[in-house]
Amino acid sequence: MAPLPPTITPDPTLEAADKALQERARKEPRRTYLGMSAIGNKCSRKLWYDYHDPLSENFNAITLKRFDDGHRTEDLIAHRLRMAPGIQLWTVDPETGKQFECVDHDNRFKGHLDGIILGLYQAPKTPHVWEAKAVEQKSFDKFKKLKIEFGEKNTLLHWNPVYYAQAQCYMGYYHIDRHYLTVASAGGRDWDSCRTEFDEGEFEKIKNKAKRILDAKVPLAKLSNDPNWYECGWCIYKERCHGTS
């Protein structure tokens, strides 16, 4: 057997695997609808671009692996929740065998629930929309801090307005008045939760926002006229929106 060569950096095998991961992602068809998972974004102009004139976002391998980690952690959390006596958790619609789906505005506005859960020890007889999020440690620590500061039912709104809008959509379209979010650190090593109440007024605002974005013939107003505004800095539409690189 030939002796091992000097250390090769970076590892060409791992590089090839990363490249294959990125190529697979680039071949995936783009979303043809406005997603309920994104409707809470503060910039309606960005959402308009996402639906009417999207740019392909080529994520690097690290980001794609983070997405994979989130999907795998969701499955892990569902498995662990089902271990608690009395918990019933459906992650697919029993009638269709597919993921729970919400559809509105002529099939142009869609969302997909992680599941519906029944038997929570806090409210055993109340069905809840269930969503699972896997986040970085900093975000997880912030969630726990906000839960103490604002109370459980206000945690989601203060922690992540995009997730909050998503929750309101799912509750509204499925006519379920409670939402149960489980938040896990990387790999599901630690977890926490919060319950959120349905807000009919907020739900109507979100539906109207979606319709306005979908029906608009031209881009909507900018979030900021300053291209150096921090929320514009990482937006893939910055050059198109502000006419600057």
Image: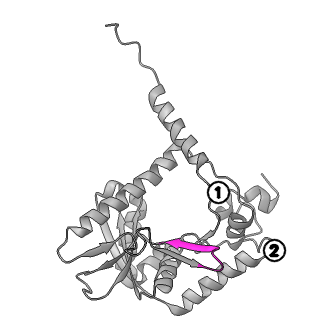
Q: Is residue 185 visible?
A: no
Q: Nearer the viewer, residue 122 or 157?
A: 122
**Number of callouts:** 2
What label sits on residue 234 in the rendered view?
1
Q: How packed is label 2: few (under 14 Cα within 10 Å), some, or many (20 or more)?
A: few
The residue that mark 2 highlights is 217
Residue under the point 65% across and 73% down: 108
Measuring from the top left, give residue 138's x and y in whole percent.
41, 60
Q: Nearer the viewer, residue 56 or 116?
A: 116
Q: Is residue 111 magenta?
A: yes
The amino acid at mark 2 is: Lys
The reply to whether discs 1 and 2 touch (Cβ–Cβ < 8 Å) is no
N-terminal-most mark, 1 or 2: 2
Q: Nearer the viewer, residue 61 or 104?
A: 104
Residue under the point 41% across and 65% down: 133
The amino acid at mark 1 is: Trp
Q: How packed is label 1: few (under 14 Cα within 10 Å), some, or many (20 or more)?
A: few
Q: Which residues are magenta?
A: 104-112
Helix, strand or loop under label 1: loop
Q: As drawn, is 135 to the left or to the right of 44?
A: left
Q: Is residue 115 magenta?
A: no
Measuring from the top left, give residue 223's x and y in whole percent.
71, 71
Helix, strand or loop under label 2: loop
Q: Residue furthest front?
A: 95
Q: As drawn, is 179 to the left or to the right of 43?
A: left
